Image: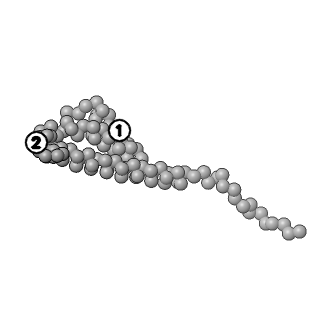
């Protein structure tokens, strides 16, 4: 079952035409997933008695998933920044660069 936000992200993901758009949708999807991790691992025990900060296997799996999502989000942000830089270079208004006139110089 998919909720409203998941459905919207799926639609945007299918219709994203540019590389920047696809990266933005993937970033939004990962951000959305990060908040839902706790609910996806409810079948594992999350607390276990012990000494110090020992957690159950569910807690370690949630932390591993959070780390993977956080790393992927950082990579996507870097890729987005690179796409924006590349787009800025590609669409530079070359017509505003002063060009040298092609007529010969007059000697006096």
- Choose between 84 and 95: the one closer to the eye: 84
Of all residues, the one furthest to the bottom in this rendering is 107
Of all residues, the one furthest to the front in this rendering is 51
- Choose between 63 and 85: the one closer to the eye: 63
Q: Position of residue 103 (x, y in %)?
A: 77, 63
Of all residues, the one furthest to the top in this rendering is 4
Quadrant location of residue 21? top left
Residue 17 in view: no
Residue 49 disc label: 2
- Tell me the residue at 18%/45% (across/down): 53
Residue at the spot of label 1: 12
> Which badge, 1 or 2, comes first in the chain's sequence?
1
Q: Are marks 1 and 2 in contact (CB under 8 Å)?
A: no
- Tell me the residue at 36%/50% (across/down): 74
Q: Position of residue 78 (x, y in %)?
A: 40, 52
Q: CA distance from mark 1 to mark 2?
A: 44 Å
Label 1: which secondary element: helix
Coloration mode: one colour
Q: Position of residue 62 (x, y in %)?
A: 21, 44
């Amino acid at each position: 079952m998919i909720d409203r936000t998941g459905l919207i992200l799926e639609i945007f993901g299918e219709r994203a035409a540019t590389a920047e758009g696809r990266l933005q949708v993937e970033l939004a999807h990962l951000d959305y997933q990060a908040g839902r991790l706790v609910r996806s691992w409810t079948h594992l025990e999350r607390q276990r008695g012990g000494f110090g900060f020992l957690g159950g296997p569910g807690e370690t799996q949630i932390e591993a998933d959070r780390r993977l999502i956080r790393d992927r989000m950082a990579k996507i942000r870097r890729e987005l920044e690179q796409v924006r830089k590349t787009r800025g270079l590609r669409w530079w208004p070359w017509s505003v660069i002063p060009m040298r006139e092609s007529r010969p110089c007059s000697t006096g």
